[in-house]
Image (cartoon, helix red, strand yellow):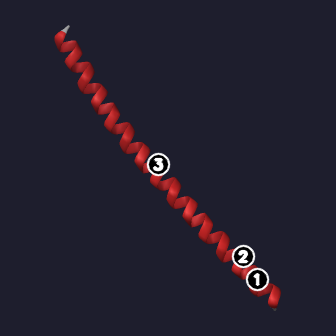
Amino acid sequence: MDNKHTSDNLTVDIDNKLIFVGKKLFLCFVGGNLYFQYNYSVVQVLSSSMLFWL
């Protein structure tokens, strides 16, 4: 019975770690996506203004 309780706690601990890592990965993904989109639009604006000046 004691063993079961310990393994349950371990499972909960692992679940919490997975959720934590998942949230971090999700935030990194969203942040990276926004960063990429922002950079992409900046590059487009810069390149179009460069073409305009050429």
Q: Secondary structure at mark 3?
A: helix
Mark 3 vs 2: CB contact within 8 A? no
Q: Position of residue 35 (x, y in %)?
A: 37, 41
Indicate whether 41 appears above or below 48: below
Q: Sequence-wise, which precedes: disc 1 or disc 3?
A: 1
Label annotation for residue 6: 1
Mark 2 vs 1: CB contact within 8 A? yes
Label annotation for residue 25: none
In screen coordinates, is 33 left or right of 45? right
Indicate whether 38 appears above or below 50: below
| Residue position marked by numbered label 2 in the rendering | 10
- Residue flagged by tag 2: what amino acid is it? Leu
Number of marks in the rendered image: 3
- Residue flagged by tag 3: what amino acid is it? Phe
Q: Sequence-wise, which precedes: disc 3 or disc 2?
A: 2
| Residue position marked by numbered label 3 in the rendering | 29
Give the alpha-carbon distance from disc 1 to disc 3, as whole Å: 34 Å
Q: Quadrant of residue 36?
A: top left
Give the residue furthest to the top. Answer: 54
In screen coordinates, is 11 left or right of 38? right
Tag nearer the camera, 1 or 3: 1
Residue at image position (47%, 48%) is: 29
